[in-house]
Image (cartoon, helix red, strand yellow):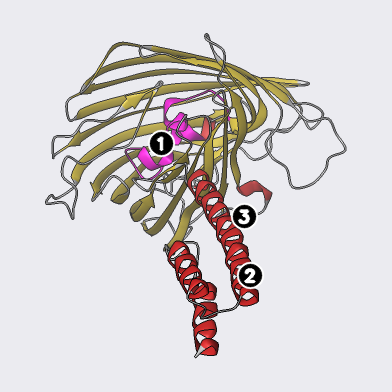
Amino acid sequence: MKLNILILISLLLLLTGPAAQASSEIETLIDMLHQNGTISDAQYARLQAELGERKVKNNQQVVSLNKQGVQAKKSSDVEVSVKGAVSVKTPDGAFTTKIGARVMADAAAYKNDNNTMGDGTKIRRARMSLQGKMYHDWAYKFEYDFATGEIKGIADAFVEYQGLDAMSVRVGNMKDPFSLQFQMNANYNLFMERSLTNGLNTGRHIGAMVFTNRKNWTASAGLFGEAVQTVGKEKDEGWGLGSRVTYAPINSKGSLLHLAVSANYRDAGEVAILRFKQQPESNVSGINIVDTGNIAKVDFHSKYGLEVAMVSGPLSVQSEYVTASVSRYSAPSLAFNSWYIQTGYLLTGESRQYRQGKFGKITPNFSVGNGGVGAWELGLRYSTINLNDQNIMGGEAKSLTLGVNWFATSTIRFSANYINVLQVNGGPLESVHPDIIQLRSQWAF
């Protein structure tokens, strides 16, 4: 009988865990068994010792579990959001990270092109981005385009200091401050491709830029080297200066007047070669409709741009004029120009968003899947570019584009464009007037 009781008490001691409330009851039972002589003094002492050891272990386990709970609470002390994009931030906002992505799948058919452009499909962009803040005042962004690949797939790659009251400072690979349609994210442009004016664009370069953004005006200026390269060079690369100033005397929800000027200067360096080219507002075939080829003996070149845009409820109008001049060694200077005007109308009543000197995304009033039909938009654009001057016959082209956009949600868009190239004089495709129909499926967050 005594042996069975001892075995029972031992089992109770083993089963006594950190969450159990039985230690005091077991101690009372041991005392009763000792007092009535059921267990001897030696057995009583052994059981008391075992009970004491168990109490110590239980206390250690409780402390350990409490520490684990504190650590778990600390590790989950962040805010996670999956609305629009995947973002994580600390409660004080000192550290943030947002993961973004976009995929554009295009299809195009070319007619009346003298068999120079092939119908087909293409992944226009397939990008992922990572951006956020560190220690409140530091920002960063890295974006890579898998559709381009290799090192040339690097788009934005910079760090930014925002701790100054008057301005911010950005260092890395970025867009030169030039042109409204280029400053806008390609996700939000009215048409699938930028206008012919993009042939005189400045592109991205590695450098440093200072800028300030206010509600009614922005200003930016930077010093830049060359674009990202795949191989080393033996000759000194070029360098450039760029600036853009915008002013919006009217800037309220659904009502906007935007004015801007920009200037860009680039020294050609020892390479002394320059080239301007542009596709017919379609990227699937990869064929340039105007192209100067390599312009040799270039000393420097400069570009100037004028912008005007307005929004009145669902109606938007946008126009730009860009001129480029090229100074050459032992050869006459060159002058090229381009301009466009476009208008869009949102049939479902939304308005184009405007912030920091550029237009943003369209957010449907009622998205598909949320009881609505999304946002529907019609667009019309006329654009022209002239790359003919002196002994350079890059071509002069004029183009008319019609477009329709369906924004099923703020992250899903479908587009259809019809492009009629009205005129081509000079250049690689002189007298070719293609008609182009192209479609896009776009997912971006």
Hey, which residue is sitting farthest front in the picture? 36
Q: Position of residue 166 (x, y in %)?
A: 52, 8
Q: Which amino acid does label 2 sit on?
A: Ala
Residue type at mark 1 is Ser
Q: Is residue 181 magenta?
A: yes
- When asked about the image quadrant of residue 54, the answer is bottom right
Q: Give the range drawn in magenta.
A: 175-198
Q: How far apart are marks 3 and 1 (CA)?
A: 24 Å
Q: Which residue lies furthest to the right in this view?
A: 234
Residue position marked by numbered label 2 in the rendering:
45
Mark 3 lies on a secondary structure that is: loop
Residue 200 versus residue 52 in the image, above or below? above
The 10 Å Cα crowd at callout 3, few under 14, some 14 to 19, many 20 or more, is: few
| Residue 238 quadrant | top right
Q: In which quarter of the image is residue 338?
A: top left
How far separated are the C-alphas under marks 3 and 2? 77 Å
Of residues 114 and 256, the one drawn nearer to the viewer in this rendering: 256
**Percent of width and height locating residue 79:** 42, 41
- Tell me if residue 190 comes above or below residue 214 in the rendering: below
Mark found first going from the N terminus, 3 or 1: 3
| Residue identified by numbered label 3 | 149
Residue occupying the point 53% across, 87% down:
2
Q: Name the residue under label 1.
A: 195
